[in-house]
Amino acid sequence: MPDIKFKSYSLRTLVITLSIFAIILIALCGGLLYSKANQIMIEEVAKESRHRVENIKDFIETNLLAKYENVFSNKVMATISTKNSEEIRYFLDHSEEDNLYRVSRLRNDLELMQSAHLGIEDITLYFKKSDFVVDTNYYYEDALNSEEYDFINRLSTSVPHQWFQRVRPDGREVLTYIFTLPYKAESDKIKGYMYIDIDIQYIEHMLDAMMGSPDEAIYIIDKAGNSINSTTATYQINSMQLNQWMSEADFKVESIEGRKTVVTFSKAGTGDNDWNYIVVRPMQSFFLSAQKLQRDIVLVCLIVMVIGLLTSYLISRRLHLPLRKMVADIRRIYGASFPAHQANEYKYINQVFFLMDMKISSLHNQLKNEQIHSLLRGNLQEMDDLPIPPDSSYLIGYIRLHSGNIDTFRTRYQKMGHVHPYRIITINPRETAVLYILHQGEVEHDSYDQIRSEIEKFKILTRNDFVFSVGLGNLVRSYKEIPNSYDKALQSLEYVYLYGYGAILLYRDIIGRRGWPEKMEYDRLETALSAGNIQTTTDFIHKFQEKMMDSDYSLEVIHLAVVRLTATLYQVMLRHELQDVFKVTADFFTSFKKDTLKETLHHILEYCQKVVRFIEDSQNNSRTSTMKDIKNYIDQNLDQDISLDALSERFSFSISYISRTFSEIFQVSFSEYLTGMRLERAAESLCGSSKSVTEISSMVGYRNVQYFCTKFKNKYGVTPSQYRKSMQGKEIQDPDYI
């Protein structure tokens, strides 16, 4: 029995499904807790690390370096007053000559200041007026003698009042701070400089004392990307890696040298120095408590999972019994109406409901479509109940789809908002009809405008998916007149031939089209085709199209005009006996019929162009043959008096025609060709015969031997006799030598 098959399979499936759900739910909760534990730990580490790096930055810039700045700022500020008699201020305006005791006292002051403040490597004063230097160790009468001369020489281009790293001549790395004298003087007002050097090793010693463990490291990066210091714990990190980290975030957890490491940044942007501070700390101590919490989470999740699996089994057993009863009831009531599904009860029930819904929906749609079809055809006796409200006005829209799927079109159209109720049915795979239901007494003009506006809006929204044309019939006041509106919609749609794809055509606009075309002068087209004139042919067909489009001719009249146009083309083909060339068949006229007038005329124009080219080529072949006859006559009669007049009389063509056509075909003018041939024939005779120059001149048509020699020399660069000598290699006496 199928029930027995269902029993084991369905129960097993239900247990597995609930078990998988329990496992996924527990795994998600456990993973969330696990991830949350990591996140909390990292946030705490980040918070503490940011606090650490800010403290270090505050110590370096606000306490340590600021202490040196403040001490020496107080000393240098005294130089602002011209009444101050201290040595620094004095030497800004006076020479050191005869004042060496002051120089000595100044050096002692610098030495005393150095000893009073730890970390100072040197203090140097440079006075521009006398060009001498004093530091904590020496007095240099000429700045050129100082080891620091290169740096002193660059003081004017250095940025004052901020710290920067440099290497002294003795190789020691220092941080240097420059004061302009007088204090904060600029440009031409600067009379001297004072700069202090702080030993970087002293700063590194202070930073090492602030580290929590030997494995912690701090890096200070200047705005050029260079590291100012190196602490005891040095990781193998290059400047490029540090700059990349700083561009991403102010806190990262990185694997450095195989160890999980916290990297914290304090980015540049505040203060005068524009330095970045980076603290690198190992993560071992932070991970211990987190790992214990993570192990506890995993254990709890495993316990909950086991409980969830047992619960899933019990719930599955409980749900399976009523399910079996439902399947048995369905089979007992409906019997063999639905095929048994051999998978499980759920799929069987789903299949039953799906098939029932499909049958009901299919029957409902089939009935509605049949009723609408009958209504359009006028078979009202076939309907017991109208599918539309009886007391309304109606208007039919007939839609022809040129590209796109008709079912997709219907679905999109039904989703769009509509002003009037409607019913839509599919006529065939490319056409559908819409029955618009309007209120009684509604003005026809307003109804047309509303429906056309609605269709135009839909056309814009779906322009990338569909191309369709619409014919709207007349407004009718009774459902019995709906077939009449349907016929008028079909008539309107036929005018797609004139207006092209995508047109929205209203019956009220075409009802007055009754005109008859004016005389089109088809003989002009016939003449242009026979003459091989492609431009006139093209212009005629374009004018024909404009006249048809701008007129009020009925569609039947336009079709007759196109047939007359095609007949003219056919007459020309018969006259020139082109039936076999173009393989004209019995369906010649119908082969030009296309969906639109534009396509039809384009096809006719292409065919006309082929005919014109063929006729033109035939005429060109005739011209070429005639010109070849003229050329042969010239070649064989060079001794005669040949001219365009003589050729015109002999061959019965005008002088201008012979001259123009000869040049077009042979790409050389008549006179150039005649002269060239005569001189070439003369050159051959000079080499191959012993005739005199006079005889040869007459033989090639020159009666004046002097003129012949002039033309020959213009072409070959030598006289005829010289040419004969050069070609034969010896001189031949010529009684007429010129």
Image (cartoon, helix red, strand yellow):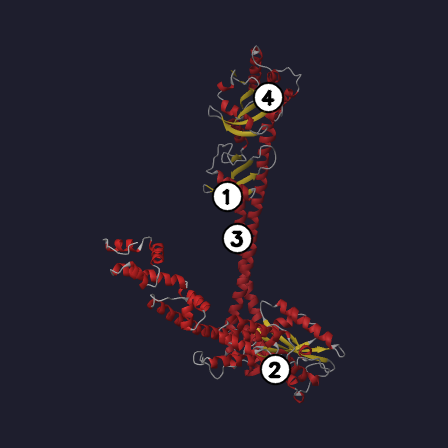
Q: Secondary structure at mark 1?
A: strand
Please identify the quarter of the rendering in which residue 543 is found: bottom right
**Coordinates of residue 641 in the picture (x, y in percent):** 37, 66
Check if mark 2's residue and mark 1's residue have beta carbons within 8 Å.
Answer: no
Q: In this view of the protein, which residue sits in the foreground, 46 or 302?
A: 46
- Residue topped by disc 4: 191
Helix, strand or loop status at disc 4: loop
Sequence order check: which comes first, mark 4 or mark 2?
Answer: 4
Position in image of residue 271 (x %, y %): 61, 33
Callout 2, which amino acid? Answer: Glu
Q: Are marks 3 and 2 in contact (CB under 8 Å)?
A: no
Q: Does 292 appear above or below 372?
A: above
Of the pair 388 and 301, the residue shown nearer to us: 388
Sequence-wise first label, 2 or 1? 1
Residue type at the position of mark 3: Leu
Q: From this view, report whether residue 125 is shown above or below residue 377.
A: above
Q: Residue at x 52, y 36 (%)?
A: 225
Going from the N terminus, do you reach mark 4 or mark 3 first?
4
Percent of width and height locating residue 548: 61, 76
Is the residue marked by circle 3 packed among few (<14), some (14-19), or many (20+) residues within 10 Å?
few
Residue carrying label 2? 556
Give x and y (percent) for residue 367.
Answer: 63, 83
In the picture of the structure, the residue carrying the numbered disc 1 is 254
Residues under labels 3 and 2: Cα distance?
Answer: 89 Å
**Label 2 near label 4: C-beta < 8 Å?**
no
Between the C-alphas of marks 4 and 3, the distance is 77 Å
Q: Which mark is residue 299?
A: 3
